[in-house]
Image (cartoon, grey):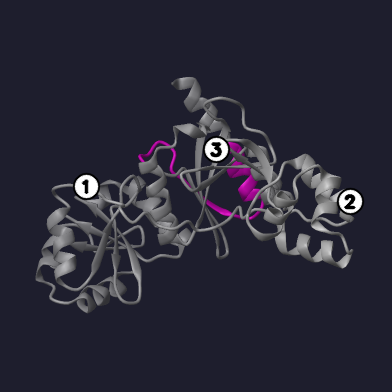
Amino acid sequence: MCAVMDVKRLFISKVVELLEKERFNVSIMEGRVSCFDILAARRSFILLLKFLLNIDGLSEDQAADIKRLSSIFRAYPLIIGEKTRHFQMDDGVLYTRYGLNAITLKTFEDIIVREEYPVTLSSRGGYYVKIDREKLRRVRRERGISLGELAEHIGVSKTMVYAYEHSDQGATLLTVIKLEEYLGEDVTAVPEVFFIPALEEDYAVTVKAHHEPIFTRLEEIGFEIQPIKRAPFDAVTKSEDDSILTKVDRRPERTLREIRLFKEISDLSGRSAFVVAESSDAKESVDGLPVIKLTELGRMETSAELLETLASRC
């Protein structure tokens, strides 16, 4: 286990160095219970990164957490790894696990530093390449080449060529090379590496017992609450105009390390944030974050009242 953690730390340090060199602001979750390891931002481009030596170690629950946070932060999630259960991962190949893209460290570097994107995808049947179907159809017709002629030259059936032109049917790398040599055109479609995945409809969170009355109270005064698992905060408090990161802490001034990380995440993601303090003598703000005492929250009657209080304490 220690050896695995050492390799992971080395992974993270290399990525942090790379990102900072490319002028990203970076926040590291190292040593904390979180579904992601790094949040990085360069202007409005936000990355949410998870490191797994074996990408098959990603669970469906972890993937759902990552998708939820990606939606909240408007961030692009990526899994960075070295191997699968059965083999080493190859550079220049895009893998997927539970709807999330996964790549090697070298591939990540190629994308971020050199803007070289992978064109090969991995599936259960092996590696394949996506074809730009509209371009293939247009080029073939412009050159007066029939489906049968093209099929014969590249060694596939006419039905398969038709599928290349009218569906998302992938092809082997050798087939694509033959296609491009015969047509004299690049017909490879670059897969989408950066995207915000769709949310899981059945995403469910077991709320901690001492958080329940707090979240219930926020709902009573007009907010929608989205509890969050495995993250450095506990929920997202949603108003009509904003989604506010929310952390529950007994006495936030005594957990400054956690509060500073929470503030980093708020700043990098561009999301407002506040702390609900369970202690009645907590300060009104900690490290630049507004704090609402539980006793204060109990007296509030509207969401506007809470928002006004937060604004006065920023």
CB under 8 Å between discs 2 and 3: no
Measured in 3D between alpha carbons, the distance from the residue under mark 1 to the one under mark 3, in whole angstroms, is 30 Å
Mark 2 against mark 3, which lies toward the viewer? 2
Q: Residues within 10 Å of mark 1 (few under 14, many from 20)?
A: few
Q: Nearer the viewer, residue 104 or 277?
A: 104
Q: Nearer the viewer, residue 161 or 268?
A: 161
How many discs appear?
Answer: 3
The residue drawn where x is 37% and y is 48% is 65
Residue 11: % across, % down: 57, 34
Residue 72 visible in the snapshot: yes
Mark 1 against mark 3, which lies toward the viewer? 1
Q: Residues within 10 Å of mark 3 (few under 14, many from 20)?
A: many
Q: Callout 2, which amino acid?
A: Tyr
The quarter of the picture where the N terminus appears is top left
Q: What residue sits right under mark 1 in the picture?
A: 206
The quarter of the picture where the C terminus appears is bottom left
Residue 208: % across, % down: 18, 47
Local SS, label 1: loop
> What stretch of residues is rendered in magenta?
12-34
* Label 1 vs 3, first from the N-terminus: 3
Residue 131: % across, % down: 71, 54
Local SS, label 2: helix
Residue 34 visible in the snapshot: no
Q: Quadrant of residue 91?
A: top right
Q: What residue sits right under mark 3 in the picture?
A: 12
| In this picture, residue 106 sits left or right of residue 154 | left
Q: Nearer the viewer, residue 242 or 28?
A: 242
Q: Callout 1, which amino acid?
A: Thr
* Label 2 vs 3, first from the N-terminus: 3
Q: What residue sits right under mark 2 in the picture?
A: 182
Location of residue 313 with respect to 198 vertically, above or below: below
Local SS, label 3: helix
